[in-house]
Amino acid sequence: MFLSTVITMLAAARTVSLPGGAVSASAPALDWGGAMPFLLLTGTALGTLALDLVVGGRGRFWLTATGLGGLAITGLTLVRGFGAPEAVVGGMLVLDDFARFFHVVFLCIAALTILVAVEYVEQMGIPPGEFYAMILFAVLGMMVMASAADLIMVFLGLEALSIPLYILAGFLRRQVGSNESALKYLLLGAFASAFLLYGIALLYGAAGSTRLASVAAHLGDRGAWDNPLVYLGVGLLLVGLAFKVAAVPFHMWLPDVYEGAPTPITAFMIAGTKAAAFATLLRALGTALLPLPPEWTAPLWVLALLTMGLGNIAALTQQSIKRMLAYSSIGHAGYLLVAVVAGTSRGYSGILFYLVVYAFMNLGAFAVIIAVAAPGEERPALSSVAGLASRHPALAFCMAIFMFSLAGIPPTGGFVGKLYIFSAAMEANYVGLALIAVLCSVIAVFFYLRVVMVMYMEEPREGMPSPALSPGILFTLVLAMAVILQTGILPGTVWEVAVRAVERLLG
Amino acid sequence: MVPLWAYLFLSAFLFAVGVVGVATRRNALVIFMSIELMLNAVNLSFVAFARFLHSLDGQVFVFFVMTVAAAEVAVGLAIIIAIFRNAETVNVDEVHLLKG
Amino acid sequence: MIQYIWLVPAFPLVGVVINGLFGRSYLRERAHLVAVPAAGLSFLVALLIALEVVAGRTLDLHLYPWIVAGHFQVPIGFLVDPLATVMMLTVTFVGLLIHIYSIGYMHGDPGYPRFFVYMNLFMFSMLMLVLANNYLLMFLGWEGVGLCSYLLIGFWYEKKTATDAGNKAFLVNRVGDAGFLLGLFLLWTTCGTLQYAEVFARAAALPAPLTAPAVGGVSLVTWITLLLFIGAMGKSAQLPLYVWLPDAMEGPTPVSALIHAATMVTAGVYMVARSSPLYSLAPPTLELVATIGALTALFAATIACVQTDIKRVIAYSTISQLGYMFLGAGVGAYASGIFHLATHAFFKALLFLGAGAVIHALHGEQDLQRMGGLRRPLKLTAYTFLIGAAANAGVFPLAGFWSKDEILFAAFTTGHYGLWALGLAGAFLTAFYMTRLYCLTFEGPFRGDPAHARHLHDAPPSMALPLLVLALGSVVVGGLLGYPPEHGLVHQFLAPSLAAAPEAAGHASAGLLAGLSLGVAGAGIGAGTLLYLRWRDVPELLAARFQRAYRLLWHQYYVDEVYWDWIASPLMRLSAFLWRGFDVTIVDGAVDGVARLLELGSWRVRRLQTGVVFNYVLSILAGAVLLLGYLVLGR
């Protein structure tokens, strides 16, 4: 959590890490410009915590404003810096366009999560200061993951993301569901981190350094891949990351954790964690591991296949809408893995594009769920949207668009994103995998459209609460709709940014 | 001098013991301790590599791992206490409200 | 100003959004306060831009990288050149007038805001169609106007005939669009781009590979242009795909004026003119275009002579005039075709709006046999209608004379004597049925419901203004732009956008030919006047005497019946068979089976998710062991 200190410390440690303990005279100057987004966000998170001590539960408005303001300022510095040359912070973090792209996505996700949660936090009696601060710390972790230039930072970012999420998942202390969600997440998450860490240790042993650049230099020699330290290390690293992206069979934690967590946090995890995990995966693959030796694509191919298939099939018969979306997020991870298998820069750009659309359509869908669910109902059934079209036509329309986008039906961003990803796979000659992906999306249409059908065809039941549209939820819905339609009808803008970000990453 | 492979072997052994612990024990606290064992097994590898590579990186890494582990333990104990209050058990196989 | 070209379609789009969001709940009877200014601003910007184009500026603007998928790159971009400018001005100006007219005509209709949403959406789509700088964006506009047309024909959706007509328009246009789309595919695979500039540059640089015999001994460019022309046949209601247009008259009259006379149906002509560099490389296609055009011109004119629904007569007249435009384009006189398109927009919109005023005054009566003698009560409507009819008939010096005469002249000088004769015969009939139409409506005694006769009132101001403006336009536009023939302003202006007209094959005196067509028009008018003003019982005698011919025309050559019996009905029987015999048992069975299988799989998979951490750990372990095992053993 005190990452800025950590960075400075590490930068200092670097300079003394010479063989035989020779100590060099001066530590390299910290690149303040590159560190600025991280420092700003750390400041915001700490500021929110401190403000919470001062104003307590009554300062709801100020806490929200501080959190959102900090996110906005951080976002602005990043957007202004887009296209600028990359900045390296103490050799540990790199702020290039790839990182900036993801940072902005994370910040948007956090801001929308806070906006969606404002009303929710009040209803559930959650202390807002801690809640927001945890979200901000988690975002800091995501940003570190996307920026990591060193395996230490991959690990630290992952943990800085996960630990606040363990807390957030269990924030409803009196609900067994929330407790269970947190416990499962913690146990399995820590278990998987241990694998990741072991992988890092082995790679360190093989390459002699934890810097991604040094690892890349070591792996550039094809012979190095025959060293068991290398292939076991990379394998364990992949296990850890596969856990985070919830690739089958490392996925089992996800439905339970997402269903039990407080609904805004589920939205945050679905949108944010996946993006962060893929950011790390792409950064690790792109800067250190590419091109993967041919025998590596086979396991990835299998992972993608299993993930797509299982996620979508298991979602078919779900009754809880949260759990359905959780399974569907596994399916989406599978589509993204298809592009990872393709391994081309077009595929990578497709992943970036898709993650943007994906984040917004999920946040939008969850905003609708929060608006529709009865207060205190943490695991709303599919029937909670029954007859929404007659109860609140605008809300039902938004939800229908989000579902269309998730299903990949034009003219939404979800369709264009799938098009980019699948066509990248086709171009890379993974025609079979692309076809399977298309088939899986056809299966997926079924359960997404079921939501639409329930909204439009079924009668509302007696005593259903009328949807509560707080300003935050309204804003989220409008923004999500705007992004989904923009990326669906005029995808060029986001696509070009994604292409440029990946160009920088792959050099 | 003890050779590198001996350290690595011990580390792998400890890691495996941790994994088996996670996979076989029911008590959340014991599972948690097993995970700590896994992390410390990795720490051993780091230190051994650092020693043989003459680089401080591995040593520094260990400090971070220990810090992170401590943070995880703090959060983990809080969660286990919370679940004990509600469900009156710390056995993970008795907590399966969420499934399917 | 020219770089702000995107404002022209943007204004109607804003109108769509505002009226779409707030029209029904908030604006209601005030919907025109948004829609009309939207059209007006669009026209204003178009006018300012047109002035710059006249001064010699053109622009190929890449606004936005729309679709970027590997080599397939299509921007959203606008091409502002003389051709686009003529179309843009026509669309925005006539569109604006018809928007104003609709305020009065649609007043009190429950769907008032909806109507303006569709109208603005139509303006937007049509402008995208004519301003696009690539074929795909044009196709988007093409489909957009088709959608609006479909929505507006079926605007009064409680009426079964209206929705049927909408469906018919939709289905027939699908046939054309399928051809158009195939043409685009072929164009893309041949040229590797859909940008006008690049396509035409390639066509100019590599005529040999394009024109060499390819599939079936026919060159690629001929295939492309043929397929594209199939789309034009559907959209511009040419033989044999014209059948939807007469039925489209079920829509509100302003719609008939704007979409089914002045603008949308001319999209096909525009497309051919826009693609003139391609068409000029494909003489066989051009011959076909000219032949279809001339045949349609005569064919539709004969039907128009006996119809008794005021709007149907004008609709057949539209089909006939569209035929003339294609005849012009087909003989290589693209500029004359576009010129006729522009003048036609004026006088045909005028005729429809006049007919609308008559229908409005008679409370929905459309049957010519129940009209008559309306000149006195509806003075303004009658005189403006007369101008429109005369312009359509090709009376000197009104608009229609100049443009139609040029087309016939071009057909003659390029050696298409047969087509020229067809056109000339059509011109005679045009003059005849226009006279008949005017006489039956406005002259003679009133034959309708006497109760209506006392309450007849002329058009309200919002409807009168467009009539006057269009009448003025129908008088002056032709001579202003078209004199001297073949070298008028419109020719000089359009020349840079179009492929050069072919060298004249024969020689002919322009004066002589013009005199001839004038004489023919005069004869038609004379015949019409005699039959419908002087000897009013003669038409019925004629109809009785030549009963078979009359009935053939009255039933519009039984084309609808033939289509129904030979195409629609067998298809429906086939699909019913497929549905019952194939779909229900085999396909549905398979789909249901797969669905049930998947559902079963879903439950199976869900049972794996036990909720117990222990199992989850095992799953992770199994995955890790498999992965690492593969890595250790697999190498």
Image (cartoon, coloured by chain):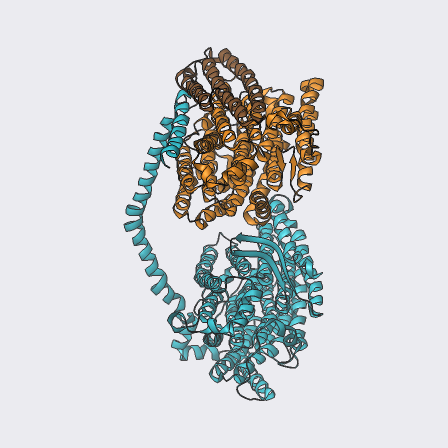
Q: Quadrant of residue C38?
A: bottom right
Q: Residue at x 45, y 42 (%)?
A: A341
Q: Quadrant of residue C392?
A: bottom right
Q: Locate residue C159, reporting x and y percent.
A: 48, 54
Q: Locate residue C618, reporting x and y percent.
A: 39, 24
Q: As rendered, which of C204 and B82 lies closer to the eye?
A: C204
Supply the letter of whichever chain is brown.
Answer: B
Q: Is residue A228 above or below residue A356?
A: above
Q: As rendered, which of B73 and C556 lies closer to the eye?
A: B73
Q: As rendered, which of C576 and C59 lies closer to the eye?
A: C59
Question: Taking the image as drawn, is residue C443 in sight?
Answer: no
Supply the letter of whichever chain is cyan.
Answer: C
Q: Is residue B75 above or below residue C361?
A: above
Asked if residue B47 lies left or right of residue C629, the reply is right
Quarter of the image where the N terminus of chain C is located: bottom right
Q: Locate residue C359, reporting x and y percent.
A: 57, 63
Q: Residue at x 44, y 24 (%)?
A: B5
Q: Colour of chain A?
A: orange
Question: Taking the image as drawn, is residue A228 in sight?
Answer: yes
Quarter of the image where the C terminus of chain C is located: top left
Q: How many marks?
A: 0
Asked if residue C359 lies left or right of residue B41, the reply is right
Q: Residue at x 55, y 75 (%)?
A: C434
Q: Locate residue C570, reporting x and y percent.
A: 32, 60
